[in-house]
Amino acid sequence: MLAEKPSELHVIEEQHSTDRIPPPAVAAAGPTCSRRARALRQTLLITTFVFWTVFFYICRSARGITRELDIHQDYWVSLAFNAERPDYKFVGDHRVPFGKLAEDEFLAIPNPASALAASRQYATKPHLAGSEGDYKTATDFLALLQRELGVPVPSAEPVFSAGSADSRNATLSITSLNAPTAWIDVYYPVMNTPLDRSLQILTDSGVTVVEAELEEVADETDPEAHQYADAVPTFHGLSRGGEAEGKLVYAHYGRKQDYDELEAKGVDLSGKIVITRYGGIFRGLKVKGAQERGAVACLIYSDPRDDGTVTVENGYDAYPYGPARNPTSVQRGSTQFLSIYPGDPTTPGYPAYENATRTEGTNIPDIPSLPISWANAQVLLEEIEEGGQNRTIKLVNHVDDRIIPIWNTLGVIPGHIKDEVIVLGNHRDGEPSCVMGATDPSSGTASAHEVIRGLGALLRLGWKPLRTIVIASWDAEEYGLIGSTEWGEDFADWIDEHVVAYLNLDSSVSGSRFSASGSPSLAYFLRDAAESIAHPTKPGLTLWDARNDQGPLFGKTGEHFDAEAQAVYEDELAQMATDDIGVGVLGSGSDYTVFLQRIGVASTNNGFSSTRSDPVYHYHSVFDSERWQELYADPGFLRHIAVAKFLGVQTLRLADAIVLPINTTNYAVQLGKYLDGVERLAERSSLDVDFSPLRASIDALHESSAALDQEKDEAERALVRLARRIALRRAIKRRLREGWCKLRKVFHKPCQEDRHEDLVHYREYRYIPSFTRPEMHKREDGVTKTKPRLGLAPARMREERERKRRELEPTAHYGCHARKARDEVDKRLDQKFLRAAERVRKVNKKLAGFERGFIHPDGIKDREWYRHLGVAPGKWLGYGATTLPALTEAITFENNATLAKYEADRLKVLIDQLSAEIRP
């Protein structure tokens, strides 16, 4: 059957229906795929943009991360040692100084103009210990500490009587402080002041034929010397009051060997008045030697033959018209028997409180004495020279002995390790040894002034030392180290437990030659610090190179030396003999004595001293004036600044070192050399003593020290490695957070870290003093509140959290908030990191206690106050040191083999104990 042909109309309808059919899916795929691709490309572009933005931000921040690394590393180290809540603040990208950066910041602060101003402040008026002028300098120093350390000034002046609850708490609470503080302690020693003095030559019938002019003579060329020439009479501090008549005997320098030679020649000193030259030994021991041989009085004068090449004989004019000695100059000073014990004569071994029980002092003379000038000495010496009349001499020295208050000014910068303390000390008083004391002690005070300014500048930058720093301005040093000794005796147990080093500064500049002295364990430390300071006057050299400097005055008419003076000068240099490194041994004569010789704290002392070709330093005279200091000692005050920088670097390196820079191995080496000297003395004295057991103990100590060296290096490296790892991770995370927050801000998205820039961060940033706290808003009623914000409940909750967070300010201490913050920190700290910190703490305890190992409770024979069996002031030296003193003196003074063996055994026991204690 044939198919029916479709009609035309039907075909047309089919065409129309076909036109209405939608296109196949494949036909629509083209435009749909294009939109998705565009979306994908946009997503990829945004992702790529974000990635490269973050990447470039990190790259740009890499330098910042590296720059921050040391900061965070130091923070984590300090946090590991901090037993309480650490106090830090975020200060943006500001870098808190630490380590080398802190040194650089510090070294930029001391400057000659400021030191000169400080010198003029302290050295242009008399300030006798216990006088109104002395109290004024004490409060001036207190104001300096308050200003530079950011200490709030209380309504009542913080002046505390020694022994009171306030005074005791001020020192004993140092290890719990969170902010700097300062105060004044008042002690009550027995001292004296002059009443009337005279010196006469009498005829046989008692008639006065010569009356000496005892005061110094100055004119307006030196304005301060002229104004105050008779402000403080020429006398000896702690001298015996009384009168004496007798014939004169010249005893050279009044040393033991000088008196022995007179005795060997048959010269009887009984009933005589001895006249000696200054030099060689401490002046009090000159009087002691005369007293023990029966003399009734002692005169001590300054001889220009001891001035090297700078004399009138060599063509130089006398001061104030030239650099030579003024013939009327007089060296005042204490006649305390320094090598017996220092401090208040009436309270040996315990502090001089106002109500203290007093004893009769056994370290002061029983015969009167007077210091006199070369002009007066010449007249007296003519009496006993060949052809002289050798007439009777009459001496009068009336003094007022009484209890006199003195003022120690102290300041504290708390550290992260609060129970490890560095003490920096300088004495402030100038009397009775001098009138103004531009050199002694005010040159040291001027340098200390610059150190404090430098530390204050670091505090304002946010620095906080790893260890606590105590700054002390001692009083009454010139009477016999009284201020420092009384504080040391008062707080001996606290010092023994907490003080790791004592840095002393007496006179910083009296001439051109630099010297550094200290415990053998600090010798390398001192050399390294001096090598980091530029020479004050010679470009290209260091401060350490200044040890070989000498003055420029070698004589206009040739060099004329007195042979005896030259021999004594060389002997004095031998007393200050340095070790192989070039660091001298500490004897006594300044405020380190109680710390080193009584308690066993590693100590240092340094400064520029006079050579035999420097302008004559009028030691303890009215001519130790500001004019002399500015004209001759240190024109431009460059040496003052070099000493300030050196002392400041010492302070920073001791305070901020992870491991204390105490070298016990060098100490062990030096002990072996000390024993070499003892064996030579015994051989010369024909004493048969076996020192081999002591030698074996020293060798064992050397081995233990070597093991400790290895342990301290490993302990420090381990802690630093962990701290650096944590610091790097924290720095990168913070940078990423900052980058993420910046990116969110681009899209106007909130960021959790978008708060005030100076928001307190408890666990991330370093302490800044309270004067840089975040800006707060005060109501009219004076109540401080945080800035209010608008918002609903979530915003109010955030505000409340912020308010509570702000309440935990850096000045807060203790309390539940501190405990909670500390607990949070402890949880975050890896136990391995804490163990590494504890390992370092143990090492530092061994290092700090090393010097204590030479302290024996029975002390040294005949002078039991001195307890250090490694070093002490020489029994007949005072200033100069004697190493292994008890053992040495058993040979040199006692000539007793049995006693020498006893002392060797006593020393051996200490060294054996020390060896066991420091071995890891």
Image (spheres, helix red, strand yellow):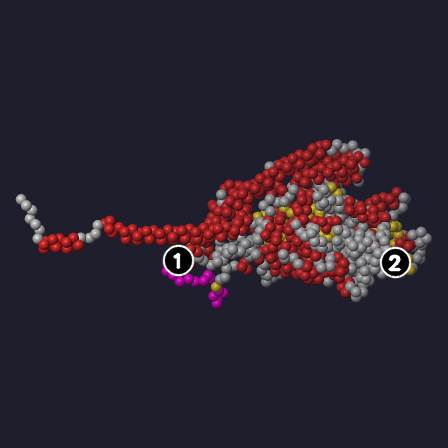
Residue 137 in view of the camera: no
Q: Quadrant of the N terminus?
A: top left
Q: Which mark is residue 840?
A: none
Q: Quadrant of the C terminus?
A: top right
Q: Which mark is residue 200?
A: 2
**Residue 63 location in percent, x, y?**
52, 51
- Badge 1 amino acid: Phe
**Residue 319 location in percent, x, y?**
81, 60
- Badge 2 amino acid: Gln
Question: Residue 120 vs residue 203: left or right?
Answer: left
Residue 784 lies in magenta, yes or no?
Answer: yes
Q: How many marks?
A: 2
Q: Determine the image quadrant of residue 703.
A: top right
Residue 269 lies in magenta, yes or no?
Answer: no
Q: Which residues are magenta?
A: 778-793
The residue that mark 1 highlights is: 747
